[in-house]
Amino acid sequence: MAISVRWLLLGASAFACLSPHPVLAAQGPGATVSAAPGTLVRWTAPGTTRCSMKGRSWAALHETCYYPIDLLQKPALITIARWGTGQRDLAHISVVPSDYGTESIDLPNIPQANPSPEDLKRDSRDQVLLSRVWSRKEGPPRFALPLGAPADPLPKGKSFGVKRVFNGKPAPHLHTGADYATPVGTPVLAVADGTVVVAKDMFFEGNAVFIDHGNGLISMYFHLSEVKVQAGQEVKKGHTLGRVGSTGRATGPHLFFGVRWHDARIDPEFLLEDPGKIPAVDRVSR
């Protein structure tokens, strides 16, 4: 099968793109940290128990708040809060523009290259199912950072956030996960304990698995050659979910791995590495 992938514009890493853009000035108290869409900010302080941002509130992870910035977030100044021993501290995230680049992909003669009306209806049903996943009530966290690898060995991921052009036609959505060039048949592994909420063949995603890890974290694994779990099943970190394949809209075998945290689409690479590398709030104000 012929594969042609051409990079038109490759953005630098998300944080490297921040420097040319001014940080929005906060009008209230608290430190200000700059971040790009698709990244996140952490806030560690002794006694931290709860976190909030944009009307959402959640439990801290080991006295640390993590604030994910959705890939589609426009430039803005976002107020964040943390609670400890009865006190509320405030800080701000200045969201600045970042261009992840554009990728041109030549799809082979597969249904996903030219979907029929019935194919698009099937995809619409898939998205209705996923809308229920994104709106699930957030349970207690069942994970710690960094997450486990979704495959072993795991090569460097690529293509998060890119604008894609399929056979000359721009895709309507950005790429919300990372692609890993793993060989066909490689076991796909759960990155943490959780509950399988979707395990099925989907039109664009192919054989796909979605896991709820609590604390609003959903992990997703696409294009599998086979699925070895079912919806409702409890899994442990490292559990084999299936095997790498090329089902759905794919030009060849690879693993798509993505995460959605508090309904924000972020680069999964940040959750697979040392969390100490994530930009942090360095002071507090009440």
Image (cartoon, helix red, strand yellow):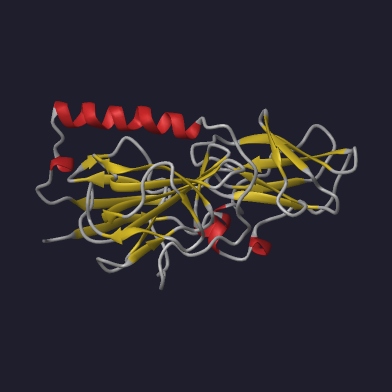
Quadrant of image for the N terminus:
bottom left
Q: Quadrant of residue 84?
A: top right
Where is residue 111 drawn, in percent x and y?
13, 41
Q: Which residue appears farthest toward the bottom when viewing the image?
A: 153
| Residue closest to the eye, 246 or 190 | 190
Residue 62, picture quadrant? bottom right
Q: How many numbered marks have been drawn onto this rendered protein structure?
A: 0
Q: Is residue 105 left or right of residue 97?
A: left
- Please give the name of the residue rendered at 17% of the width and 50% of the height, measured from the top-left corner: 107
Q: Is residue 222 above or below residue 90?
A: below
Extreme residue toward the front, this view:
233
Residue toward you, 104 or 120: 120
Task: Give whichever of 175, 22 is nearer the camera.
Answer: 175
Answer with left or right where residue 176 lies relative to residue 253.
right
Residue, x 57% and y 65% (percent of image)? 273
Residue 122: x percent and y percent?
A: 23, 30
The percent coordinates of residue 165 (x first, y second) are: 26, 45
Q: Quadrant of the C terminus?
A: top right
Residue at x-position 57% and y-position 32%: 137
- The one nearer the camera, 181 or 147, is 147
Question: Looking at the picture, how far across and down is residue 209, in whole percent?
Answer: 37, 48
Q: Look at 51% across and 30% down and name the residue there.
A: 135
